[in-house]
Amino acid sequence: MTTTPTTAADVAAAQTMLFVPGDRPERYGKAAASGADAIIIDLEDAVAPEAKGAARDAAVSWFAGAGTGVVRVNAPDTEYFDDDVAALAPHVDVVVLPKAQDPQVVTTLVARLREARPDAAVFALIETAQGILSAPQTAKVPGVVRLAFGNFDLSSELGLHPDDHDALWPLRTQLVVASAAAGLPAPVDGVSGSIDDTEVIEADTRHAVRVGFRAKLCIHPRQVPVVAAALAPSADEVAWATRVLAAWDEADSGAVAVDGTMIDKPVIDRARRVLAAAGVTA
């Protein structure tokens, strides 16, 4: 198990991010050893009100002891938020902010965190209608490292089903555009409710990839390898990207065709992204 701190750069590059309930410290180490790129110790939804204080203390002990991961604090409009931030700010480089919908609140949080750790950052969870509308501004707040899509809370507010790909895809793409416009990494998709149905988890992940996401939140260790495999480019995609770059390198002019399609810079950029995602050096 790694015990190196999880930094903003780690969060920016992560593809699989696993929640672990904050009031179950015996699971922290297992989560860190699950193969997920990052773990999120959750003080919010996974913890009952009467256990909030104990969960906070357990998280502080984990991070103070060089435990890896980031932490999701309670929402800004709760009685727990200020205490969460005060307790965790000295110990973590990244705080996951639920219900991120007011850029000024995000700005203030970054400032508070950086009083304790100058490189601290916020990972903004967009899960309300107002959060979607303000996502372009939230993404541009200095210190925001990435956006994530909260499909369950957002669907509840809008009266939609959290697994309805067709209904939610326009909302997902708004985070993709907001992230790109702000120069952030591609956003992180929300969780799949199914723990054991690998076909559902894979389909959810592949849909997210199709609309521009490059990472996904997980709620159980069994989801992690399924999500990781679904996020990876297929063998056909890697072969296509390899052919494209080889043809481009061998071309005598600025125009070349591969598989009957003309290749130009945007296609080259896409091919390089495919190979990078597959861990292949272009």
Image: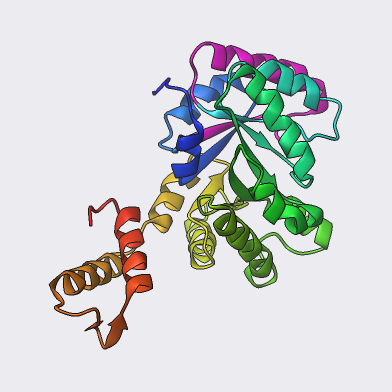
Q: Quadrant of residue 161?
A: bottom right
Residue plotted at (62% across, 58% down): 178
In the displayed structure image, the side of residue 34 where residue 20 appears, left or right: right
Q: Which part of the image, by quadrant, shows the N terminus?
A: top left
Residue 144: image location, x then y, percent = 61, 40
Residue plotted at (45% across, 38% down): 36
Relative depth, front residue between 264 and 122: 264
Relative depth, front residue between 6 and 165: 6
User: Does the segment drawn in magenta span residue 159?
Assistant: no
Q: Which residues are magenta?
A: 39-68
Residue 267: image location, x then y, percent = 35, 73
Q: How is the image coloured?
A: rainbow
Does 214 sit above or below residue 3? below
Camera sees residue 95 = yes
Residue plotted at (53% across, 24% down): 28
Q: Which part of the image, by quadrant, shows the C terminus?
A: bottom left
